[in-house]
Image (tube, rainbow, N blue to C red):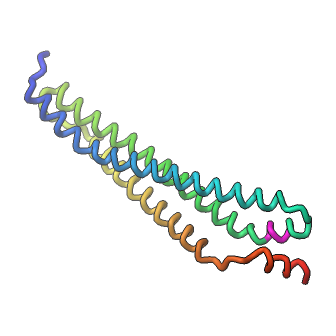
Amino acid sequence: MAFNPNFLSESIQLSVAPVFLLTAVAGMISALTHRIARVIDRSRSLQFEIISEKSLEHQLVLKQFHQEELIYLSKRANLVNISMALLVLCAIQIGLTILELFFAETIAGKMSISDYVLYTFIGGISCFILALMCLLWEVFIASYTVRMKPQSKASISLKTEQ
């Protein structure tokens, strides 16, 4: 079976369009990697602050004070992980779409798209949208925790003396 160069160029053109979505997915995965790193760093910082406190009373107050933020950090980490998993699933499905389009064009010699192309493409786009929604929710949580009223160590000391 000889390959027709025209069919090959058309199949490459058709297969390249979803590649742009893969580029967006790669960019989002990079951004999520940075967000999870920030969450982990902040969590470690808070935990170190609690552990490094010499006074047991202050340590308990710090633990209680930081507990709410640590809970929010845990929620943020879960949302970033879910979003990351959805993006990887999206990338797999879009990759399968590209392979299906390319093989349908080159093997059959003319366009005979399988029924799976529609499902993998819609599945990939659905995962992308769900990942964006998880990212948005994580950003809302992060914004909320920044607006929480900060307390100084002096005010914490006052609480322990009461």
Is 61 magenta? The answer is yes
Does residue 131 appear to the left or right of 67 in the view shown? Answer: left
Is 9 magenta? The answer is no
Looking at the rendering, which quadrant does residue 158 occupy?
bottom right
Q: Residue at x 23, y 39 (%)?
A: 16
Per the rendered image, the range of residues in magenta is 60-64
Does residue 157 appear to the left or right of 71 in the view shown? Answer: right
Does residue 111 appear to the left or right of 71 in the view shown? Answer: left
Q: Residue at x 65, y 59 (%)?
A: 42
User: Which of the two residues, 93 or 156, is positioned nearer the viewer here?
Assistant: 156
Residue sticking out furthest to the front = 154
Is residue 16 placed above or below 7 in the rendered structure? below
Q: Main secondary structure of the magenta part?
A: helix
Residue sticking out furthest to the top = 1
Q: Residue at x 37, y 54 (%)?
A: 126
Is residue 130 placed above or below 93 in the rendered structure? below
Q: Residue at x 18, y 40 (%)?
A: 14
Is residue 146 placed above or below 13 in the rendered structure? below
**In what quadrant of the picture does the N terminus appear?**
top left
User: Which of the two residues, 127 or 150, is positioned nearer the viewer here?
Assistant: 150
Indicate the position of residue 19 as horizontal and vertical percent values.
Answer: 28, 42
Does residue 130 appear to the left or right of 151 in the view shown? Answer: left
Indicate the position of residue 110 as horizontal and vertical percent values.
Answer: 12, 31
**In what quadrant of the picture does the C terminus appear?**
bottom right
Residue sticking out furthest to the bottom = 162
Indicate the position of residue 32 as horizontal and vertical percent values.
Answer: 49, 53
Tell me, yes or no, if residue 88 can be seen here.
yes
Tell me, yes or no, if residue 123 can be seen here.
no
Is residue 6 placed above or below 93 in the rendered structure? above
